[in-house]
Image (tube, rainbow, N blue to C red):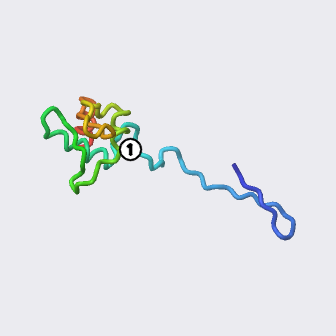
Amino acid sequence: MPVSRKLADGNNVVALQPHRPRGDRKSKPRGALSGAQRDWLARGLAQPGGKLPLFDRDGQKVSDRTIKSCIRHGFAEPWFDNQIKPDWLVCKLTDKGRIALNAEF
């Protein structure tokens, strides 16, 4: 929507935003993995049953946002309840997650 401004001499000026074609958007395609998602899911490929790690390679807890996003998209699923730390989600890789990883590489 144009923005109207009054100049000192009383004339109105309309400022327009440059047009950007729809195909020029910088967003990733729907269903594409973020870097954090790809790194976390890829580590489950070599684990028995596709178990996904609770911690990254630097020993930091994997972000809850990354885990919940992967679960929401169906790339991972909760595996079992962690009795010692109930707030930690123990997850495993799903077939959809394996397909998404194969499409990325």
Return the residue nearer the eye: 76 or 101: 76
- Please, what is the three-letter code of the amino acid marked with disc 1? Arg
Residue 90 at what x, y percent from top left? Answer: 26, 36
Q: Which residue is mark 1?
A: 65
| Circle 1 residues within 10 Å: few <14, some 14–19, many ≥20 | few
Return the residue nearer the eye: 103 or 53: 53
**What residue do we see at 35% from left, 44% from top?**
66
Residue 98 at what x, y percent from top left? Answer: 23, 34
Horizontal arrangement in the rendering, residue 32 relative to residue 9 (left or right)? left
Residue 26 at what x, y percent from top left? Answer: 45, 50
As drawn, 70 above or below 4: above
Q: Identify the residue at the far front of this view.
A: 84
Q: Quadrant of residue 49?
A: top left
Q: Element at badge 1? A: helix
Q: Identify the residue at the far right of this view.
A: 10
What is the tally of numbered marks visible in this picture? 1
Residue 2 at what x, y percent from top left? Answer: 71, 52
Q: Where is the C terminus found, in terms of image quarters?
A: top left
**What residue do we see at 37% from left, 37% from top?**
31
